Amino acid sequence: MPDFAPLLAHRKATEATPIAALFAGDPSRFAEFSVQLDDMLLDYSKTAIDAEARSRLLALAEAAGVEARRDAMFAGEKINETEGRAVLHTALRNLSGAPVTVDGQDVMPQVLDTLARMESFATGVRDGSITAPSGKTFTDVVNIGIGGSDLGPVMATLALAPYHDGPEVHYVSNVDGAHIHDVLEPLDPATTLVIVASKTFTTIETMTNARTAQKWLADAGLDSGGHFAALSSATEKTADFGIDPSRVFGFEDWVGGRYSLWGPIGLPIMIAIGAENFRAFLDGAHAMDTHFREAPLIANMPVMLALVGVWHSNICGYDTRAVLPYDQRLLRLPAYLQQLDMESNGKRVALDGSALAANSGPIVWGEPGTNGQHAFYQLIHQGTRVVPCEFLVAAEGHESDLAHQHDLLVSNCFAQSEALMVGRPEADTPHRVFPGNRPSTTLIYRQLDPFTLGRIIALYEHRVFVEGVIWGINSFDQWGVELGKELATAMLPLVQGGDASAKDGSTAGLLTVLQGLRD
Ligand code: F6P
């Protein structure tokens, strides 16, 4: 952990100055405390970070070796030390022609070959040249996956709705049979393509749902083979499942699950929006990669967003961060970021295994505005806890005939960050007082097109990376999900009536009640 003491002392000395007052002393504060990348701007002037805080935060990044670590990541070094793997999701969006090497080997020919295979498959499904065995065109695609094999594609598919011109794409993730039941029920098996998305091809939820889909097809008298495709690193397992190798799209272990939507796991997105738009999505992410690699730290959007995060978490002591897209189609961005951020940085030990001396990743949550305003903003404005808010908003919507609604949306977004900062200190009753001085950032961009979505996701990926480097943790493993999986496997026979006497009192009690309710 870095030495936070100087920043903590600075915070103590300046805490009494409200954020709003920082503007009075510095007319150029907005320009000074924002980062621009083409038609996208990150405003962090509505935080308590002043010039000294920022230079100390930048010093933290330098002391932690953020630049060297970043360069090591892009160079294919095995920075995921606990799993002995490189971290190269950035290679999946590298259409620049530049090589990327792992263990001395250029991985780009393989990456580009897989992309070309995905494009040919997606295009065939979209234009009807690849059909179901009956010769019928696929009208619907059901992607079965969970975690990183679901959240990114779900989020991006929703985000890019104006670009959909392919078959309808649906997602099944939960092992709860209600999920697959409700998704499959309205569909015609004869015209449905099922994609099984699982890096490991062992995840119990996904394999269970895949077998249910196989049975759904078989019950309709269809040969499931012609209705299945797979996205996985475990090609021998996809073969065992009976999926034709020509419909299997593989990727390497240097693509982490939650960073995988740029490659084969993005196939359902590509089927929905087409290969050209998918390339624009990759290009956007690559543009953010280039910015992250080249911009000086103070003008580097992911770095500054990370430093704002560290400031709020470790210096101000705020435990959560709310992601508030004023962009309805970013409905699932908070859920996507929960995995990206909390699975990456929800760690309690440093790379060397020693216990962390300060907090690592905060709790991430959120909902789109304006809906959230009518739900939890009461607490954000007047509750006892301070919640740093991260607003996102587009200058323009896609619905030009509804531009007046977009103006209302933007007004609400700007009004919320203003209200949080300025508050309303005087009122006839304490119940109407807004204390203000509550921090927020705003990311504003021209329009939520594929290129911009790519930039936004890559921005958050690199933000999580920089924070992880500063905290000295490995952001690329996820051992914390294992115990629950193991115990669930052992629990199944007990749920089905086995002897629960060796379990703790509560678990044994719940198992007894379960049997009672079922009798
Ligand atoms: O939740 C744990 C996890 O391993 C995630 O990291 C991953 O994205 C998800 O499960 C799904 O894994 P797979 O793609 O192997 O099915």
Image (cartoon, rainbow, N blue to C red):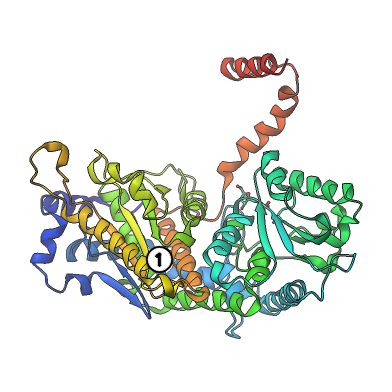
In the image as oriented, which residue stretches furthest toward the bottom?
97
Residue at 75% x, 19% y is 497
Secondary structure category for the residue under label 1 = helix
Q: How many marks?
A: 1
Residue 301 placed where, x, y %? 36, 70
Q: Which residue is mark 1?
A: 66
In the image, 273 versus 490, the foreground residue is 273
Residue at 62% x, 60% y is 85
Residue 500 placed where, x, y %? 69, 17
Q: Quadrant of residue 102?
A: bottom right
In the image, 155 versus 188, the foreground residue is 188
Q: Is residue 252 visible?
A: no
Residue at 24% x, 59% y is 415
Q: Quadrant of residue 260?
A: bottom right
Establish if 340 lies above or below 74.
Answer: above
In the image, 419 versus 135, the foreground residue is 135
Say left or right for 314 vs 157. Answer: left
